[in-house]
Image: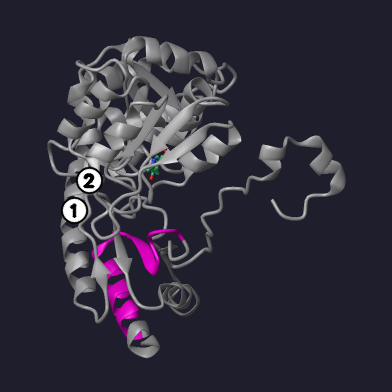
Amino acid sequence: MAGLSKRILSLVRDDVAALSPYDPNFTPCKINLSANENTYGMPPKVRAAIDAAIAATPTNRYPDPMSNELRDQIATWHHVRRENVCVGNGGDELLFNFFLAFGGPGKRLVDCPPTFTVYDIYSKMLGTSVVRCWRDEETFDIDVNALLLMARKADMVIVTSPNNPTGNVMAPEDVARLCETCPGIVLVDEAYIEFADGGCSCEGLLADYDNLVILHTYSKAFCLAGVRVGYVLAASDVIDVLGAVRQPYTADVFAQAAAQAVTSLRGVFTPTINRIRSERARLAEALSGLEGMQVWPSQGNFLLARMPEAAIVRARLRDERSILVRDFSSTQGLENCLRITVGTPEENDELVAAIGSILREVV
Ligand SMILES: *Cc1c(COP(=O)(O)O)cnc(C)c1O
């Protein structure tokens, strides 16, 4: 952090002083395609169920600390038991708790950049050392053999599948090998799994590997980014450890009620998810048709696109068109890349037209 006073510098740990706050660089815009939310919004039928559930929820009592009703619903959904589920205040909190439980000084994390930057922030915060298995510069695929070698000495491995921001998945067979090789815990961050082709999830491996942790969230496909609910699936002793480090009431009564309503009605999201998948293909094709543009295939609800002068394009989209996308152009390995959330057909059309005309001017 820049500009800390001498007094504050003398009070905080050196590793904390070296941190910077997570800043997604948000600016309010007419079209927000920057944070991989579901831009189609909550289906009205589900919204009505959430509103009714919230209206019936008293606020004077503490929430169920373990969110047991929600855990039971999630367990039924994913064919595991309540003991295999931990609910958190968004996936981010569960990731933090994962670092709190299994990371720290003397512990080693292996991750596969370019990927979600939150892992780096939490490892710094908790003094965990990080070994990086860089993805292929062209395809962003993971070199599985290199990863397996590194995993032999890891306390924790995180694989993001589909990966944010590159959109590709790691095959469950490869994750199985990873779980066999790694003496530590393997976390597969599946925040975007609902948008991926069938068979991409590593859930099916849980029965075979007691060192596997799967992270899911209600923030992306299920339109609850503003409410903050996520969950992990893992062996019961891993869940016990995560339960021990967690703060008691992070899933508040409204969040539990909303997540329960969404879980009961999750089938209602299927048409929107399919729509996002078909829009993803249409948007990828339209962007690829622009001069100088490279777009990677994606299993998430976003596309990674490389173009000339990406930082300028991004600033002009925001300032002249009120369209916000995420700039990765100064991230190592993602030079001149922007990440674009797949929006509604109208949003996507407006974006493609805007990028097209800006690119014609800048190149
Ligand atoms: C969005 C995201 C999460 C979790 O988001 P929450 O809103 O905290 O549930 C986790 N991992 C990745 C890779 C994400 O993109």
| Stretch in magenta | 331-357
Dot 2 corresponds to which residue? 195
Labelled pair 2, 1 in contact (Cβ < 8 Å): yes
Q: Is residue 340 magenta?
A: yes
Q: Name the residue carrying label 1.
A: 277
Label 2 environment density (alpha carbons within 10 Å; few <14, some 14–19, many ≥20): many
289 to 263, vertically: above or below: below
Tell me where residue 236 sits by quadrant.
top left
Q: Nearer the viewer, residue 81 or 64?
A: 81
Does residue 192 appear in the picture of this structure? Answer: yes
Residue farthest bottom in this picture: 361
Q: Residue at x 35, y 33 (%)?
A: 150
Task: Name the kind of residue labelled 1 in the image.
Answer: Arg
Name the residue located 30 percent from the left edge and 58 percent from the top edge: 137
Q: Amino acid at mark 2?
A: Phe
Q: Image check: 266 left or right of 20?
A: left
